[in-house]
Amino acid sequence: MASKLTYLTAPLIDKNPITLQILGICSALAVTTSLSTALVMAAALTAVLCLSSVVISLIRHHIPGVIRLIVQIVIIASMVVVIDEVLQAYAFGISRQLSVFVGLIVTNCLVMGRAEAFAMRNPAWPSFLDALGNGLGYSLILVLVGVIRELFGTGTLLGYTLLVPKSEGGWFEPLGLMQLAPSAFFIIGALIWGIRARWSAQAEKPKLVLVDVEAPR
Amino acid sequence: MLNPLSAWSGFLARPNDDRIKVFGVAILVAFFSAVLVSTASVVLKPMQDAHLEAERAERMARMIDTLPGLRSIMEEMGIDALQSRLVDLETGAFVEGIDPTSYDIQAAATDPERSVAIPDELDVARLGGRARLAPIYLLERDEELLLVVLPVVGSGYQSTLRAMLALEADLKTVAALTITEQGETPGLGARVETPEWQALWPGKQIADESGEIVISVVRGQATSPYEVDGISGATVTSNGVGNMLRYWLGPHGFGSFLERLREEGL
């Protein structure tokens, strides 16, 4: 049991889908302008990932190799549509803000990646733990980036004002850059740098090394 | 007699590269996914519709707020919503006996009993057909018409556009246009929904001196009171809005109703 739990904990930092595997970056840039959209997107992706991984894992022995990617995509896409419909029914305002990005979970490499790399080869329970772990790892980064961008971009968190901006008589000058997509690149880049500096095993080995050669005579 | 259970286990026992198995798995996965998606869509539809309805009401209220002085007139008269009436589009007369608030024009437009086909040459909005009756909203004071709001529908680039068009008492000047529903490309056609674009509409004239409906959405800059700037990168959507208004203000749309109002008043 304890060994199975590493499926859940490993993707949080050691094998984090965003910072180590560099998957799912597109949505991480787009939906992190505020914490609430980041939270809903993280929950939606985790739900899709868990459901599709379990389903794919359950029928993995009967998925013909020639059409396995199509089968995976069909399953993932139907889960995404269901989640999108649920959001439109229960969280209408936020589903409007997320607009196309919930639908684009279908094309998130993270979901396909876990289905192909893990769920196709493992039983349902480990697949579920792996999916949940990866979903939480993705959520962790999204929430971190969302907190930084919303707090420093507008001075609020989940809509509550924490840092009173100058325009309303406080001292805080909102950083407009934080609300733009490039800031997510900078934050994620800094996170990757920090994590790889702390856990140096994650750093990629250079593919090419410069060596001194003797000057030609 | 084929035993379904043994047929099923026989199917599962087939090797994965077997052609029957490949087709069978594909069909089964597609079938179950389709059932799942349809169920979710049907079960959740009423709640989504309630949200859309609330959004539409909010937009209507916001449109009233954008019209200068309208709120104060309404407050003075002690009402908080416009008066709703049903109009027979063919005769232009009001219809009594049906509650306009419970009348569903979208359902009526697809019901053969309650709709008519639009002749091809008039169907600039590419609708195919329209409901016989349409709800309109009025604001009057002492029998004098102040504002009339018409619901319109048309085709954009990839979705159905729905809007509310408010006309001033002369029935020629646009008071406001609010797009209430669209599913156009985000960032391009979807910009018809922005307040910035809708702010271009107030004051535009729908018809020239002879009474012909000439309002249109043009590429680039508008040069006359009958033209509105189009949205760059969204020509089809922009034209769709223009065509929608030309159909609904024309003889097959609200034309006879507007003419009757002009001649007889309320």
Image (cartoon, coloured by chain):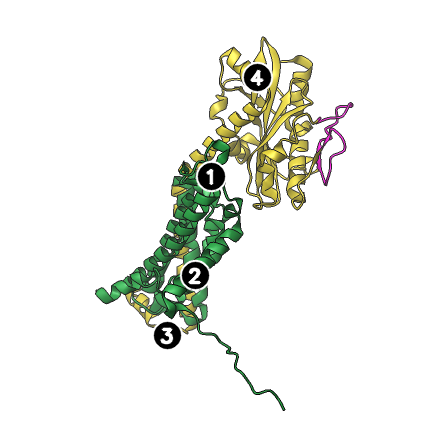
Amino acid under label 2?
A: Ile
Q: Which residue is mark 2?
A: A192
Q: Disc 1 is attached to a residue of which chain?
A: A
Q: Disc 3 is attached to a residue of which chain?
A: B
First in residue order: circle 2 vs circle 1:
1
- Tell me the SS state at disc 2: helix
- The magenta-colored residue range is B205-227
Say yes or no: labels 2 and 1 on the same chain.
yes
Say yes or no: labels 3 and 4 on the same chain.
yes
- Select label 3 or label 2 by which is in front: 2
Which residue: 42% across, 49% down? A41
Q: Is residue B67 left or right of residue A82?
A: right
* Place of residue A91 in the rendered image (x, y in percent of width and height, measured from the top left): 40, 40
The reply to whether the magenta stretch includes residue A14 is no
Q: Which residue is mark 4?
A: B139
Amino acid under label 3?
A: Pro
First in residue order: circle 3 vs circle 4:
3
Which residue: 49% across, 12% down? B78
Q: Give me the C-alpha separation between circle 3 and circle 2.
A: 44 Å
Q: Give me the C-alpha separation between circle 3 and circle 4.
A: 73 Å
Which residue: 51% across, 14% down? B75
Q: Give me the C-alpha separation between circle 2 and circle 1.
A: 28 Å
- In the current view of this chain or complex, which residue is farthest to the right? B210
Colour in which the image shows chain A? green
Q: Which residue is mark 3?
A: B15
